[in-house]
Image (cartoon, rainbow, N blue to C red):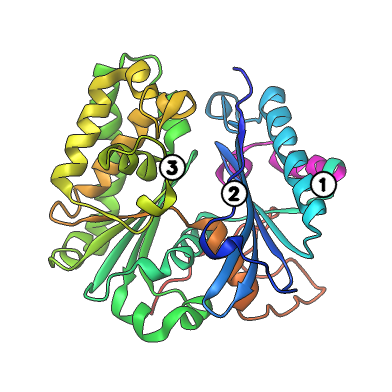
Amino acid sequence: MAEKKSRSRRPRGRSARKTGGSPLYAAVDLGTNNCRLLIAAPNRSGFSVVDSHSQIARLGEGLAETGRLSDAAMERAFSAMEAISRKLKARRVGRIRCIATEACRKAENGAEFIAEIRKRTGLTFKIIGPSEEARLALIGCHNLIDQAAEHVLVLDIGGGSTELSLVDAHRARENGLNGMLKHAPIKAWTSIPYGVVTLTEAYQHLGEADAYPAMLAAVKEHVETWAGQHNIRQALEKETSHIIGTSGTVTCVAGVHFGLERYRRDLVDGKWMDRAGGVETMQALIEAGPEGRAQFATIGEDRAGLMLAGCVLMEAVWSLAPHARIRVADRGLREGLLLSMMRGPKKKRRSRGGRGKGKTRTGATDAPKVAE
C-alpha cells in the first residue's frame, strides 16, 4: 500500500495568538491507523493549540494475521515520527508525552519497535492500556457533557479497538476537570477488540453487502454482553442522556451529515446529530461504496475503505440508546493527555523494588479505574 500523505493544520481560534512565553507541551499518539501530534500552551481555560500534525501510517496493517508489525508499516510510522520529531525540535517543546495504543499492545515486536523509535528520533513512548485510553478520551471531551445529562456514553473508535465508557455526568459536573483528573467518574467501561482497521481486515474476504451484517453481528455481540452486565440501556434511557463520539469516523460522518464542502472543525466539534439523521447519513455512505465514499470532501480516499467498519461500530453502539443524540468531538486522547500533563496530580515515584502493582512489561495498566 502506498504511503499516505501527512496533514498539518494551522492553529485555530485562540491557538493563533502568541503564547506569551508560556511553556509548550506536546502529546504524541501512535495509534493503529494514525500518528498524531498536538502542541499547546496552557492558559486559564485549558490550553491554546500552537501546532498539530496527523499522518496516516496504518501501523496495524496485517497485524491480526501475523501477530507482528510489518516492516512496511513500521517504516511508515518511522517516517511519521521523524516528521513529528522535527516539529518538536523546531518549536523547542520542553514537556512531551508519547503514548502508543492497540497495535503496539498486541504486536509481538511492539516493544522492539518502540525501542527503535527512541533510537531513531529520541522520542520515548509508553504503551498504555485500554482503560487509560478510555480515561484520557473522557478528559479530552469533558466539556462536551450536556448540563442536563444524568449519564453519558463516550464512544472512542480507534484503528485497532473501540473503547466505551459510561460516565456519571452529575459527578463529572460537580467535581469539574480537576476532580476528573484525580478520579474519572466512569461507572463502567469496556474495550471492544475491533477498530476500523482490524474490523475491515477481518471481513475483507466478503463483499460489502455481506460484510456489513456479518461485522454488525460480531460487534453487537461484544456491545450487548457488556451492556447487559452493567445495565447500560437502563442508565441511558432518560431523554437527557447522550453519546459523545470521538474519532475520525464520527467526524467524517458528521461532515457528510452537515453537508460540508470541506472539513471545518468549528462546524463539527461540539455539534449534535440525532439518530434519524445519523442513520440516514450512514446508510448513504454504505450505499455509495468505497469509490463513492471517496468523493465526499470530508472522507477522501484515505478513509473511504474504513468507513464501512466505522459505520458498523457507530450503529452497534447507538443501538444501546436509540433515542439519544450524538455529540461530535473533534478532540479526545491527545487533549486528555495534555490536560493531564498540565493540570493533573503529580505522580509519585515508584520504589526500586519492582515495576509496581498493576503494570505490565510495556507499562499498560491492567485494571480500570472506575467511579465508586
Q: In terms of depth relative to the viewer, which is nearer, 104 or 23?
A: 23
Residue at the disc numbered 2: 10
Which callout, 3 or 2, points to the residue nearer the camera?
2
Q: Position of residue 16 (x, y in %)?
A: 60, 60
Q: Amino acid at mark 1?
A: Arg
Q: Amino acid at mark 3?
A: Gly
Marks 1 and 2: in contact by CB < 8 Å?
no
Spatial distance from mark 3 to mark 2, Cα to Cα? Answer: 18 Å
Q: Is residue 159 left or right of residue 57?
A: left
Q: In terms of depth relative to the viewer, which is nearer, 109 or 243?
A: 243
Residue at the disc numbered 3: 248
> For the magenta stretch, what is the residue range?
101-119
SS type, badge 1:
helix
Q: Position of residue 155 (x, y in %)?
A: 36, 53
Vertical comparison of 128 with 81: above or below: below
Instruction: Tell me, yes or no, whether the highlighted magenta stretch contains residue 82.
Output: no
Vertical comparison of 199 with 110: above or below: above
Q: Is residue 54 left or right of residue 294?
A: right
Residue at the disc numbered 1: 118
Q: Amino acid at mark 2?
A: Arg
